[in-house]
Amino acid sequence: MSRRRLQQVPWNAAGRTSEVQSSADDVVREVGWVFNNATGERLTLAEFVRTGDEEVGSYLQLFGLASSEDERRTLVEIGAGIGRMTAGFSRRFGQVIACDLDAAFLERCRQTVATFGRVGNLRTSPVTDGRSLGLPDAVADVTFSYITLQHCAHDDALALVGEALRVTRPGGQVALNFRAWTTLDAVLVPLGSLMRAAWRLPTVGAWLARQRFATRLGWQANRLAPEEVLAYVAAQPHGCAELALYTSPRRTSPRRSGVAVHTFEGINRSHWWLVARRDGAPGQ
């Protein structure tokens, strides 16, 4: 595996772990170090999905992504995991295409949606190379990604931004979550690089890749500032007619011509969102 793809090590390890769990609740408990800030023996999938339902409603409303036509629209989710938010999306949208690096997680995602959502509205699509969506152009009315791009290698994260624009229809919207630089990153990012190197070590590397503390450090993979992402978006062949940034009110946001800047208390201080509408009228 190339150095650039080392971020995938714990994700694949978690996928293999999830395959041998007897229940979905066990998956949440055993691989919570991947996608869940909470830990403990009493965690259940129902509780995990409930947190996703709350965020689905909040973000769709905040970003203006919801429509009275949602039952006839398609949403692509980049980084679906085992379906924490996917279940909620499936109850709102006529079709949800869940994309993730690990096929085992996508199978667990299907099980989650079958229990808590509308599995008939679900399709899954693996992101086998970590940077390309295996989907045709212009299939989505909404493309959404939350707490995923910060765990990708720098160039892969940018490539997925381009992919999000590519698979979104003219007139459709994208909402992508990023992590920006903070003072603490002067320590976290170098430690993350060292931890990823440690995952290469025989025997101990595989053990480290399954530990919560090691994963959290090793996934300090990239920090993308709004200026860099906006420049990348401007260079793409799939242009945007509307661009907006959403940040925490405790963070200073850049001002750029043609880009609206909004603040929301519920956004983590180290996070920011790009919300954009593809050029063109729907159906073009």
Image: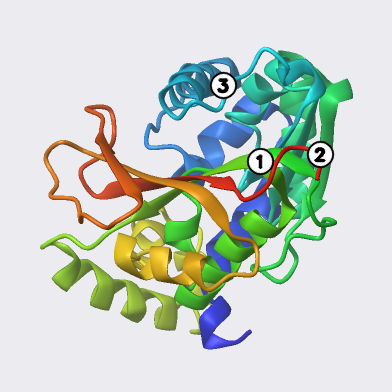
Question: In the visual, does 50 lie left or right of 1?
Answer: left
Q: Determine the residue positioned at 33% across, 55% down.
A: 179
Question: In the visual, does 103 lie left or right of 37?
Answer: right
How many neighbours does mark 2 have within 10 angstroms: few (below 14), some (14-19), or many (20 or more)? few
User: Can you see residue 117?
Assistant: no
How many neighbours does mark 1 have within 10 angstroms: few (below 14), some (14-19), or many (20 or more)? many
Give how far apart the Cα atoms at labels 3 and 1 are.
30 Å
Disc 2: which residue: 283
Please, what is the three-letter code of the amino acid marked with disc 2? Gly
Disc 3: which residue: 49
Q: Position of residue 100 (x, y in %)?
A: 68, 52
Give how far apart the Cα atoms at labels 2 and 3 are.
33 Å
> Disc 3 or 1, which lies upstream in sequence?
3
Nearest the viewer among 105 and 23 is 105
Q: Quadrant of residue 111?
A: top right
> Disc 2 or 1, which lies upstream in sequence?
1
Disc 1: which residue: 171
Q: Determine the residue positioned at 76% across, 49% down.
A: 104
Q: Position of residue 116 (x, y in %)?
A: 70, 15
